[in-house]
Amino acid sequence: MVAGLRAVGPAADPAAALIGDPVPRVRVGALRALGAVGEHEHVAGVLEARDDPEPAVRRAATRAEERLRTRLDLA
């Protein structure tokens, strides 16, 4: 999760594109990155991932949502 550790903002759009990847581990990584560097336009994708069939992805989506709400000062 280099994007989050290094706050690499440009990683957000590529990460958002990976939310639909067929590999759950990739989806989890994408959500972690979005939680760290995502912007308002990425919130919808994170929220959709809360309904993922994979429990680990759902947990990552919930954590990403919490981080985004805090970072972006969302209600």
Image (cartoon, rainbow, N blue to C red):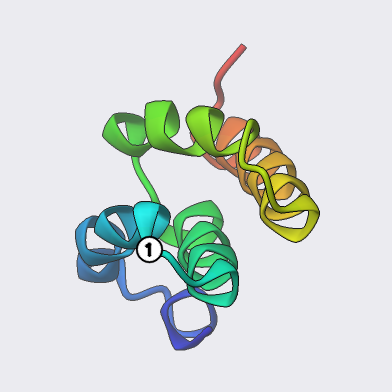
Q: Residues within 10 Å of mark 1 (few under 14, many from 20)?
A: few
Answer with left or right where residue 53 lies relative to residue 40.
Answer: right
Considering the numbered disc 1 on the image, is that residue within a helix, a strand or a loop?
loop
Return the residue found at the far top.
75
- The residue under the point 64% across, 45% down is 61
- The residue under the point 62% across, 48% down is 64
Examine the image and state in which quarter residue 37 appears: bottom left
Residue at mark 1:
21
- Name the amino acid type tagged 1: Asp
Expressed as whole percent of the image width and height from the top left, the position of residue 11 reads 27, 70
Q: Nearer the viewer, residue 70 or 21?
A: 21
Q: Is 39 located above or below residue 23 in the figure?
A: above
Quadrant of image for the C terminus = top right
Expressed as whole percent of the image width and height from the top left, the position of residue 27 reads 50, 63
Expressed as whole percent of the image width and height from the top left, the position of residue 48 reads 50, 29
Examine the image and state in which quarter residue 39 appears: top left
| Count of numbered circles in the view | 1
- The residue under the point 51% across, 74% down is 4
Q: Is 43 located above or below residue 33 in the figure?
A: above
Answer with left or right where residue 21 lies relative to residue 28.
Answer: left
Answer with left or right where residue 63 lies relative to residue 23.
Answer: right
- The residue under the point 40% across, 35% down is 45
